[in-house]
């Protein structure tokens, strides 16, 4: 891995699957895991093996199926969780145990009724125990986003001392501002002894709609892994959307950060996950929403027809979308109507277009969107129809 490579850790099958009512069965998980491997993710977090026999089985089956990608299982800092995860991962070519504990003042007080010293000890013991099963151990400091940086640095040092290879810094509640999250990563890079032995990982939730921005700030400040889900699914407001962070890095090459993702697979896997889980993505969702490459206002349509780059920063084919859509509504202009009419077989002169356009506006005021069938009807009922068909 080069210094500029950002590892993509996909947690669609673990954190993403925590969406209420969207549980996947093992068969569905295997189909998604295979497509994640084809997409080029570096790590698949396959589940939380101790949580249920079903999750254990899914992690075990995914471990058998996946050939080149690291397969990861989540645990708490609890011996039995770690033992069970190691058992579920035993067939994986590249197994990783992801263990950790809450580190913020509120987690220490209310979840554990404990103190910082005891948390440091549990972090150390958990990583050490996980290391007795696998070489690759990732440690998470839950609620790191609200954890005091000085204490967080001490927790990270403990985890490194016990052998952690990756340090996950979750903004569990999606609270941080991008500048704050970036500064946290920078602080850890500069103040944790032994930090060169591990990579820092961003795990940002989207409660304030900042998950993508926070993850990008994280990697700009030295993190080299992003934890994310397809379509940004996850409990509450979800996780960082994989397709967003990958395309931000791709569209800004001067950041000099790249990933191993084959971006033309993005749209297909987005559809697969939304259909398998029964969660439909909002039409205006960045990169994969139905309207992400659709143009509806006259000014935009005219620009895109002349040159796609006037209103599009991404070539749709780059993310697996066949082409941009020129959507006909009452806000569309003559250029869009001429373009769509040509696509269904009518080459209109300027005068013919004026007449057909007047007819089109009457139709479009009655209907939200004009489809190809409507275009035939609009042309057939226009005054100039005879000229058009005899031309
Ligand atoms: O959001 C979080 O803190 C998590 C950890 C369990 C990694 O998902
Ligand atoms: Zn999470």
Image (cartoon, rainbow, N blue to C red):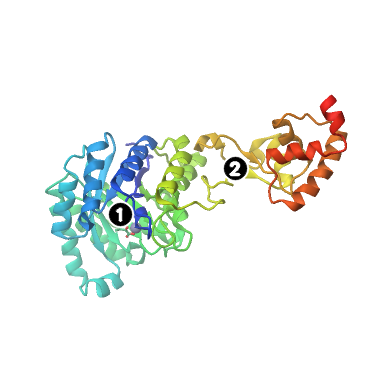
Q: Nearer the viewer, residue 357 or 41?
A: 357
Q: Position of residue 365 (x, y in %)?
A: 76, 52
Q: Quadrant of the N terminus?
A: top left
Q: Is residue 324 above or below residue 389?
A: below
At a point 54% along the width and 34% down the height, the residue shown is 317
> Whereabouts is ligand 1, in terms of quadrant?
bottom left
Is residue 285 toward the left or the right of residue 92 in the image?
A: right
Q: Quadrant of the C terminus?
A: top right
User: Which residue in the protein does label 2 denote?
Assistant: 293
Q: Position of residue 282 (x, y in %)?
A: 53, 53
Q: Nearer the viewer, mark 2 or mark 1?
A: 2
- Answer few, some or many: residues within 10 Å of disc 2's Cα (few below 14, many 20 plus, some between 14 and 19): many
Quadrant in the rendering for residue 125: bottom left
Q: Earlier in the sequence, mark 2 or mark 1?
A: 1
User: Which residue in the protein does label 1 denote?
Assistant: 168
Q: Position of residue 57 (x, y in %)?
A: 22, 47
Q: Position of residue 181 (x, y in %)?
A: 41, 59
| Disc 1: residue Cβ within 8 A of ligand 1's nearest atom | yes
Q: Give how far apart the Cα atoms at labels 2 and 1 are.
A: 34 Å
């Amino acid at each position: 891995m080069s210094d500029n490579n950002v590892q993509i850790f996909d947690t669609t099958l673990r954190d993403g699957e925590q969406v209420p009512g969207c549980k996947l069965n093992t068969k569905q998980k295997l189909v998604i895991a295979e497509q994640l491997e084809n997409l080029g993710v570096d790590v698949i977090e396959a589940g939380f093996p101790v949580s249920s026999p079903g999750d254990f089985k899914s992690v075990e089956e995914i471990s058998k199926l996946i050939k080149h990608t690291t397969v990861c299982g989540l645990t708490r800092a609890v011996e039995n969780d770690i033992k069970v995860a190691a058992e579920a991962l035993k067939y994986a070519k590249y197994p990783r145990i992801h263990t950790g504990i809450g580190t913020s003042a509120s987690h220490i007080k209310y979840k554990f009724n404990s103190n910082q010293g005891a948390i440091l000890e549990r972090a150390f013991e958990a990583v050490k125990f996980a290391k007795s099963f696998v070489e690759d151990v990732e440690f998470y400091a839950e609620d790191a986003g609200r954890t005091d940086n000085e204490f967080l640095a001490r927790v990270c040092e403990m985890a490194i001392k016990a052998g952690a290879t990756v340090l996950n810094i979750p903004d569990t509640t999606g609270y941080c501002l991008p500048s704050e999250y970036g500064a946290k990563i920078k602080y850890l890079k500069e103040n944790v002894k032994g930090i060169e032995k591990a990579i820092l990982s961003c795990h940002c939730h989207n409660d304030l709609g900042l998950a993508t921005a926070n993850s990008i700030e994280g990697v700009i400040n030295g993190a080299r892994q992003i934890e994310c889900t397809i379509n940004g699914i996850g409990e509450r407001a979800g996780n960082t959307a994989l397709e967003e962070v990958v395309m931000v890095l791709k569209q800004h090459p001067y950041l000099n950060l790249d990933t191993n993702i084959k971006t033309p697979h993005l749209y297909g896997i987005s559809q697969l996950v939304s259909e398998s889980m029964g969660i439909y993505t909002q039409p205006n969702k960045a990169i994969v929403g139905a309207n992400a490459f659709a143009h509806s206002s006259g000014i935009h349509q005219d620009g895109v027809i002349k040159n796609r780059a006037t209103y599009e920063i991404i070539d749709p084919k780059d993310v697996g979308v066949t082409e941009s859509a020129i959507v006909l509504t009452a806000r569309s202009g003559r250029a869009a109507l001429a373009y769509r009419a040509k696509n269904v077989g009518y080459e209109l002169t300027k005068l013919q277009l004026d007449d057909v356009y007047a007819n089109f506006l009457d139709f479009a005021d009655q209907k939200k969107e004009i489809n190809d069938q409507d275009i035939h009807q609009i042309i057939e009922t226009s005054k100039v129809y005879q000229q058009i068909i005899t031309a």
